[in-house]
Image (spheres, grey):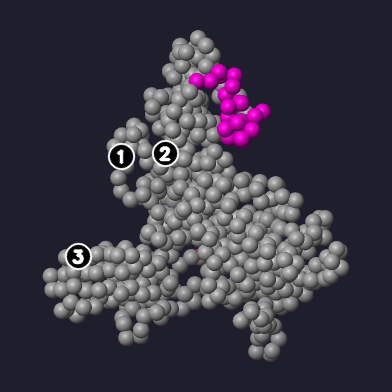
C-alpha cells in the first residue's frame, strides 16, 4: 500500500470514518453540524477513557463519590449560576453572505507598503499564528472574489505570527490583529466573502426547550451546558446521605450541550459532548493547596495514558482572563495537529471557584468583581435572582467550625480527550505494507487482542477458537480467519489492537502460537496455554 498523503488531520478523520471510530451524525441526510456519532471502535475507546477516569478519580480514592444528574434542571439553577445572563460568546455576522463567526476567531490582516493601495482582509483562525498560516489561501480567495489583479499571484512568506507579501508591484508587510483590537477606521471584512461584518454582539450558548404541554415563558427550560451545577444542587444530599467529610469530591460524567457559533475541528468543538467533572469541596484555608494538587494530578493523568508531555502544557490564566467567580484557573492544553505550530487547544480546565457556587445557590446570584463578592441586584435593589434559600454551609466536626466550602473544579471533556488520544496514537510507519497504525495505551485500546488461525483449514480454526474464547472471557477481542495474515495484522494495527495471536502449523506440533506486538511488529512464540497470562501481565501489569 502507498504511503498516506495529505495533511495529518485529514488522514486521521478519514481513518476514524473508515474504521468506525467516529461518524458524522445523520450522515445519510447530509449531516448536522456540530454533532457526531461514535461507531463500534469509537464507543469502546470512549468508554475506556471514561472508565479509566472513573477508576482513577473515584474508585481508587477514599475522598470521592459519584453522581449522575438529570440533563434538564430547574431553570432557576441556570439563573443563579450565571449561565442565563453571562454564558455567551461574542459573534459577528456578514451583512452579505450572512455567515456567522465567533468574534474571537476572526482576524483582520492589513497589508501595508508596496506601491498599490494595499489590502485589508478577514481571516478565520484559532489564533494569530493560525491566521498567519491561513493568509496565503485567504489572499488568493479575496483577490479572486474582489477581482484585485495585483494580489492574484502574490507570494506570501509566513514567519510565525507575521507575513510578507510580494506582488509584481511591490512588497507588503501584513499586520494580523484580532477583530476586537483593530481601529475603527479599518474595514471589518468577512473571511468568507470579503464584505462587511456587523458589530460584535452576545449570543447565549444554552439550548432552550419547553417542559410539558404548554409552550410559554413558564415552561422554558435549558439543556445543561455543564454537568457541574447538578453536583452543587446535590451537595447537601450527598453530605446528608454518606459519611464522607470535607475535604472530598463529587464526580460526574455526562452529556452537556452548547449551541456553539462555529463548531469545528472535528469533534473538538461540538454542540453535544460529554464532560467528566469533579467538584472538590475543601476548607477555605486549604483551597490553594488543593488547587495545585488537582492541577498537577490531572496533568499527570493524561501523560499516564500516553499523551506526550512535550505536546501538553499547563497554562495559568491571566488575571483579566479569569471568569467572574474564579480565584485561579489553569488549562491543560494539547498541541492538536489541526492547530498552527505553537498553538494549543484546551483539554481540561482546573478552576479554583472559591465559594461562589454554593453561596449563589443559597443566596442568589453573586458576582465576584476585583476579588470581592458583590450581590448582583435588580432595579428594586434586591438580588436579581433568588437562591434556593437552603443552607448549603458545612459543619466541620473536627474544627468545630461552620463554613461554606471552597471548590476546586477539574472539568474535562471526554470527546476532546478522546480526540487527543486519537491524534497521539496515529502513527505512520512506512516500512510496513500498511503504514497507518494507532498506538493506543493498552488501557484505552478498543480491542485488546486478536486471535487468527493462519489458514481457515488443516485443523487450525479448531485450535484457535478455544484460545479466542478464553481471551474473550476477560477482554474485548476479535477472531478473524479471512484474508491474508498481513491484511489481518494491518486491520488490527488501524484499530490499535496491542497483541495478535496466530495459530499455525507449528502450533499443531509443539503447542506454541505467534504473538505479534502492534508497536514493533516483532513476533515471538509462547505456549498457547500462556496466552491469558501473557495478556494479564501486558495489559494489567500483574500476573494472575
Ligand atoms: P472553550 O474555551 O474551548 O470553549 P471552555 O473553557 O468553554 O472551552 P469549559 O467550560 O471549561 O470549556 O468546559 C470544560 C471542558 O469541557 C473543556 O475543557 C472541554 O474539554 C469540554 N468542552 C467544552 N466545550 C466543548 C465543546 N463545545 N465541544 C467539546 N468539548 C467541549
Q: Quadrant of the N terminus?
A: top left
The residue depicted at 43 percent of the width and 65 percent of the height is: 262
Q: Which mark is residue 437?
A: 2
Q: Quadrant of the C terminus?
A: top right
In magenta segment, residue 106:
no
* Position of residue 389 measured from the top left corner of the image (x, y, whole percent): 77, 75
Q: Is residue 136 visible?
A: yes
Indicate the secondary structure of the residue bearing disc 1.
Answer: loop
Label 2 C-beta lies within 8 Å of the nearest ligand 1 atom: no
Q: Reading the chain from its start, which is encountered first: label 3 or label 1?
A: 1
Q: Residues within 10 Å of mark 2 (few under 14, many from 20)?
A: many
The residue depicted at 44 percent of the width and 49 percent of the height is: 423
Q: Reading the chain from its start, which is encountered first: label 1 or label 2?
A: 1
Which residue matches tag 1? 3
Q: Nearer the viewer, residue 240 or 92?
A: 240
Dot 1 and dot 2 residues touching (CB under 8 Å): no
Measure the alpha-carbon separation of dots 3 and 2. Answer: 37 Å
Q: Nearer the viewer, residue 506 or 265?
A: 506
> In this picture, which residue range is highlighted in magenta?
525-544
In magenta segment, residue 538:
yes
Q: Reading the chain from its start, which is encountered first: label 3 or label 2?
A: 3
Which residue matches tag 3? 155
The residue depicted at 58 percent of the width and 29 percent of the height is: 535
Does 427 appear above or below 373? above
Indicate the secondary structure of the residue bearing disc 3.
Answer: strand
Indicate the secondary structure of the residue bearing disc 2.
Answer: strand
Amino acid at each position: 500500500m502507498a504511503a498516506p498523503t495529505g495533511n495529518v488531520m485529514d488522514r486521521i478523520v478519514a481513518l476514524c470514518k473508515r474504521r468506525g471510530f467516529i461518524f458524522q451524525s445523520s450522515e445519510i441526510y447530509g449531516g448536522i453540524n456540530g454533532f457526531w456519532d461514535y461507531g463500534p471502535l469509537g464507543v469502546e475507546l470512549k468508554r475506556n477513557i471514561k472508565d479509566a477516569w472513573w477508576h482513577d478519580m473515584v474508585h481508587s480514592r477514599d475522598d470521592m463519590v459519584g453522581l449522575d444528574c438529570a440533563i434538564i434542571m430547574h431553570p432557576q439553577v441556570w439563573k443563579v449560576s450565571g449561565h442565563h445572563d453571562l454564558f455567551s460568546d461574542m459573534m459577528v455576522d456578514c451583512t452579505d453572505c450572512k455567515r456567522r463567526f465567533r468574534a474571537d476567531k476572526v482576524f483582520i490582516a492589513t497589508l501595508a507598503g508596496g506601491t498599490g493601495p494595499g489590502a485589508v482582509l478577514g481571516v478565520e483562525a484559532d489564533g494569530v499564528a493560525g491566521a498567519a498560516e491561513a493568509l496565503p489561501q485567504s489572499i488568493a480567495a479575496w483577490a479572486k472574489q474582489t477581482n484585485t489583479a495585483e494580489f492574484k499571484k502574490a507570494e506570501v512568506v509566513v514567519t510565525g505570527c507575521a507575513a510578507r507579501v510580494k506582488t509584481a508591484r511591490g512588497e507588503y508587510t501584513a499586520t494580523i490583529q484580532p477583530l476586537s483590537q483593530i481601529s475603527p477606521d479599518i474595514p471589518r471584512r468577512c473571511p468568507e466573502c470579503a464584505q462587511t461584518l456587523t458589530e460584535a454582539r452576545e449570543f447565549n450558548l444554552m439550548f432552550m426547550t419547553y417542559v410539558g404541554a404548554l409552550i410559554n415563558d413558564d415552561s422554558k427550560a435549558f439543556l445543561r451546558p455543564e454537568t457541574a451545577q447538578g453536583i452543587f444542587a446535590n451537595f447537601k444530599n450527598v453530605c446528608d446521605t454518606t459519611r464522607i467529610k470535607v475535604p472530598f469530591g463529587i464526580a460526574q460524567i455526562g452529556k452537556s450541550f452548547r449551541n456553539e457559533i462555529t463548531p469545528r475541528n472535528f469533534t473538538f468543538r461540538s454542540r453535544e459532548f460529554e464532560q467528566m467533572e469533579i467538584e472538590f469541596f475543601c476548607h477555605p484555608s486549604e483551597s490553594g493547596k488543593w488547587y495545585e494538587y488537582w492541577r498537577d494530578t490531572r496533568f499527570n493523568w493524561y501523560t499516564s495514558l500516553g499523551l506526550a508531555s512535550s505536546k501538553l502544557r499547563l497554562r495559568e490564566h491571566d488575571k483579566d482572563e479569569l471568569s467572574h467567580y474564579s480565584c485561579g484557573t489553569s488549562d491543560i492544553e494539547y498541541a492538536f495537529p489541526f492547530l498552527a505550530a505553537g498553538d494549543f487547544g484546551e483539554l481540561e480546565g482546573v478552576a479554583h471557584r472559591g465559594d461562589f457556587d454554593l453561596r449563589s445557590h443559597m443566596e442568589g446570584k453573586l458576582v465576584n468583581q476585583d476579588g470581592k463578592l458583590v450581590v448582583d441586584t435588580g432595579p428594586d435593589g434586591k438580588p436579581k435572582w433568588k437562591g434556593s434559600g437552603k443552607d448549603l454551609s458545612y459543619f466541620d466536626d473536627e474544627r468545630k467550625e461552620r463554613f461554606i466550602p471552597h471548590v476546586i473544579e477539574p472539568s474535562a471533556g471526554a470527546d476532546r480527550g478522546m480526540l487527543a488520544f486519537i491524534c497521539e496514537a496515529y502513527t505512520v510507519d512506512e516500512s510496513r505494507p500498511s503504514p497507518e497504525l494507532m498506538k493506543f495505551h493498552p488501557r484505552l485500546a478498543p480491542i485488546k487482542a486478536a486471535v487468527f488461525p493462519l489458514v481457515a483449514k488443516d485443523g487450525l480454526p479448531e485450535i484457535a477458537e478455544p484460545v479466542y474464547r478464553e481471551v474473550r472471557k476477560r477482554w474485548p477481542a476479535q477472531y478473524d480467519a479471512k484474508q491474508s495474515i498481513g491484511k489481518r495484522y494491518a486491520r488490527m494495527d488501524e484499530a490499535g489492537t496491542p497483541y495478535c495471536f496466530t495459530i499455525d502449523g507449528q502450533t499443531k506440533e509443539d503447542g506454541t502460537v505467534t504473538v505479534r506486538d502492534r508497536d514493533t511488529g516483532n513476533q515471538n512464540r509462547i505456549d498457547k496455554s500462556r496466552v491469558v497470562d501473557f495478556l494479564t501481565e501486558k495489559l494489567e501489569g500483574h500476573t494472575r
